[in-house]
Amino acid sequence: MKKFMKPFAYDLDLPDWKDWMKEHGEPEFRAGQVMDWLYEKRVNSFEEMSNLSKKLRDNLADAFELQPLKIITSQESQDGTIKFLFGLVDDHAIETVVMRHNYGVSVCVTTQVGCRIGCTFCASTLGGLKRNLTAGEIVAQVMTAQKALDESEERVKSVVIMGSGEPFENYEPTIQFVKIINSPKGLNIGQRHITVSTSGVVPNIYRFADEGWQVGLAISLHAPNQDLRSSLMPINRRHPLAELLDACWYYLRTTGRRLTFEYALIGGKNDQLEHAHELGKLLQGMNCLVNLIPVNYVPERDFTRTSRNQIFEFKKVLDSYKINTTIRREQGHDIDAACGQLRAKHNKLV
Ligand code: SF4
């Protein structure tokens, strides 16, 4: 399998660049210059870094890869959502979604090629996990999206780590990615404008809480009890709901931040009012937001969609438990915007 022979230039944050310059006998300020070229001027080659010496540019080109991700397809929805299918150096394909909101542009990134978690409502897991992405491959998704947005003078304001894959099973690269996009020399995206979502890898929820960051955390919950959650999300057998909730309380105590719970409503499975009451009791008293998501249609899964009326009734029950609840606005409904759908089609998995 063809893989990167060299690290990707986007794999490094400022301290890494400083170390590299030191090791190569260059002054430290060159680190900041390289990052300016990468993230502010957004060049695609070291050759364009005209304030660096020819020798340094050649050394950098010998040491690092710096090519944009290959755009296999991009679909633009009527609401402005863009879904990219990017090709990696080893010919795997990954998805990245650009969403235009009234508060700015947000990018949803992928952290793994495929996924091994096996959630029953998700197309990303069909075909299993192929490999983890490097930090640089995650950064490159935002950069390639930003370069496309440069044409319309739009700027990526926020990033959600909610695309294909389980970020907490690819923990270090995900953390390095956050450092790079948050860095003033990187994309300078504020921590409060970054959210990472996990299906419930409990040990890394504790680890993430201890990072001491203001980065948001979302938990894919999708069921209010152990049995139902295990039937929808096999990870719930490895990390049971009660342990997940303990980790959530730890996160709340440690960070003082609000937690988001994602709840995909799946017709007839988890969308009944009894489920809403159970959920209300489970989360009562927590500083949290429940995000209700009408489930996306995955052709071979045969799930039905919950009616609008039922969604509002579900929300009313949660309101009665004083739980902040939103209903996710659907974007990109006229394109293959559900997580994993475009890649699955490309790989002929559906
Ligand atoms: S929902 Fe997320 S964690 Fe679950 S299978 Fe899909 S990509 Fe993996």
Image (cartoon, rainbow, N blue to C red):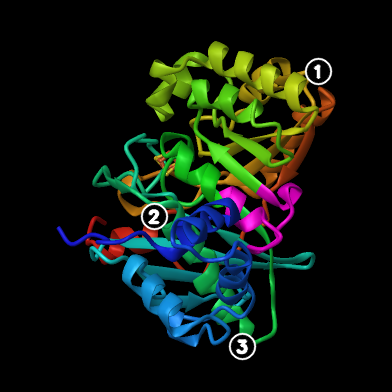
Outermost residue to the left: 1
Report x, y in % for residue 64: 37, 66
Helix, strand or loop for disc 1: loop
Q: Give yes or no for residue 271 being in the magenta stretch.
A: no
Answer few, some or many: residues within 10 Å of disc 2's Cα (few below 14, many 20 plus, some between 14 and 19). Answer: many
**As displayed, is residue 122 above or below residue 224?**
below
Answer few, some or many: residues within 10 Å of disc 3's Cα (few below 14, many 20 plus, some between 14 and 19). Answer: few
Q: Identify the residue shown where x is 67% and y is 50%.
A: 194
Kindly identify which residue carries mark 1.
285
Ligand 1 lies in quarter: top left
**As displayed, is residue 154 above or below residue 300?**
below
Q: Could you say which disc has been placed on residue 151 in the image?
A: 3
- The kind of residue on which mark 3 rests is Glu
- The kind of residue on which mark 2 rests is Gly
Answer few, some or many: residues within 10 Å of disc 1's Cα (few below 14, many 20 plus, some between 14 and 19). Answer: few
Q: Is residue 45 visible?
A: no
Report x, y in % for residue 348: 22, 61
